[in-house]
Image (cartoon, helix red, strand yellow):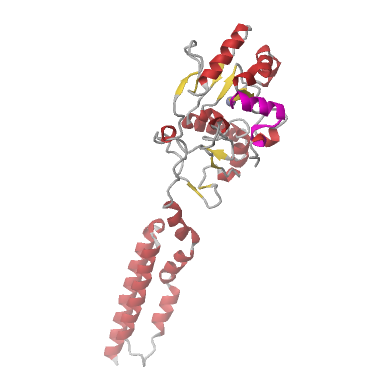
Amino acid sequence: MTKKILTAAGAVVALAAIIFCVHAIRTNDNSIIDVTEISDYEQTITETISAVSEFIDPAEPQPVTAEQTAADPGIAVPSAVTAAPSTTARTPESSTVKPAPSAPASTTAAAPKTTAAPASSTAASGTISNYEYAYAGFNPRYADLNVADWTLTLVNRDYILPEGFEPPELVRSVPSVSDSKLLDSRVAPHYNDMYQAAKKDGIILETVSGYRSYSLQRNNFENKISKYRNQGMSKIEATQKAATIILPPGTSEHNLGFAMDICSLEQSFENTAEFRWLKAHAEDYGFILRYTKEKQSVTKIIYEPWHWRYVGVENARKINASGLCLEEYLGKVS
Ligand code: ZN
C-alpha cells in the first residue's frame, strides 16, 4: 500500500513537472504557436496523463490528479488558443499572395519602393484585406489597369493602385520649362500642347504638382492626418477629413501621372483668367476638371478648380457634354 502511494505521488509530481514545462513554453510567445504545435501539446498532455494513470491503481481513486488538472489553466490553454479565430485565420490570409497587377509589364515591373504598410491581399469580396486605412471606413479594391481605353483608368478612394506603382515612363510636362512637373509620357505631350496654346493667348498654365510617388502621397496624407489630430480630432475623424483633400497613397490621379494641379491650390483660382481659359479650352487637349463643386458627394473630394485630369479629347468632350463626373460616366459610383 505504501509503495503504491509513493508510486502515485511520484507520478503526480512527474505530471506537474510536465504541465509546468508545457505552460512555460506556451506563454513564451503565443503569437508564434500554430495549429500543428497546439495539436502536439494536446497530444503530449494526453499521452502523459495516460502514462501516469498506468502507475496508479485504478482501485484506489486519486482525485488529486483530476482536481489538479482541472485547476491548472496550463491544461486548458491549448484548446482555448485553438478556439481563438485570430490564430487560425491568420495562416490562410498571410499565405495569400498579392495578385499580380494586370497592367503592362513595363508599368508594374518596378519593385515596390514603399514597404511601410503591411502586406495586403485581396479578400473574397474584391476589397483589400488588412488595408492600412480600413479603420476609417475605407475599403478599396485594386484599380483596373487593363481597361480597353487606358485614358479612362479610374483611381479614387475606392480603386487603388498596387503598392509601389510607377507609371511606365515619366517625362517633363513642358520640355521648354526645366522645372515643369512630371507626367506619364503618354499624357505630357497633350499638356505641353495645351500649355503652348494658352501661352499664345497670354496665359501661363504653371505646373504646381504633377506625378507624385506612392511614398510622397503617403507622406502628404499622413501629414494631413497629423495636422487634424493636433487640432483635437480622433484618428478616424482626422483620416476621413484628410481624405477629402489629399487622397490616401495609391488612390490619387497624381500617383497615376495623369493629373496636373495648375497655377494655384486655392479655390479662388476659379476667379482667374487661367481658370476661365481652362474651362473654355482644356477639353480640346483631353483634360477635364475632375473635382467639381456639383459632384463633391460623388467624388468625395472638395472642389478643386486647379486639378485637371487627362482622359483624351473624345472622352473629355463627351464627359463635359454629359455633365457627369468620371465615376458616373464610367458607371462606377460607390
Ligand atoms: Zn491635384
Which of the image's four quarters has the C terminus? top right
Which of the image's four quarters has the N terminus? bottom left
Magenta residues, dominant SS class? helix
Give the number of callouts.
0
Q: Is residue 147 left or right of residue 244?
A: left
**Relative depth, front residue between 164 and 60:** 164
Q: Position of residue 63 (x, y in %)?
A: 41, 84
Q: Please report the residue visible at 44 percent of the width from the left and 32 percent of the height from the top.
A: 107
Residue 39 included in the magenta stretch of the image? no
Q: Position of residue 19 (x, y in %)?
A: 35, 71
Q: Where is residue 333 in the image (x, y as percent from the top left)?
A: 66, 40
When asked about the image quadrant of residue 197, the answer is top right
**Is residue 54 shown above or below 293?**
below
Q: Where is residue 196 in the image (x, y as percent from the top left)?
A: 57, 11
Taking the image in four quarters, ligand 1 sits in the one at top right
Q: Please report the residue visible at 39 percent of the width from the left and 66 percent of the height from the top.
A: 38
Q: Please report the residue visible at 41 percent of the width from the left and 56 percent of the height from the top.
A: 31
**Is residue 234 shown above or below 181?**
below
Q: In this view, does 125 lie to the left or right of 317?
A: left
Residue 316 included in the magenta stretch of the image? yes
**Is residue 315 shown above or below 80?**
above
Mark yes or no: residue 186 visible. Answer: yes
**Relative depth, front residue between 161 and 87:** 161
**Relative depth, front residue between 69 and 5:** 69
Q: Please report the residue visible at 29 percent of the width from the left and 89 percent of the height from the top.
A: 4
Q: In this view, does 241 lie to the left or right of 82?
A: right
Q: Is residue 204 left or right of residue 20?
A: right
Q: Give the range drawn in magenta.
A: 310-328
Mark yes or no: residue 289 visible. Answer: no
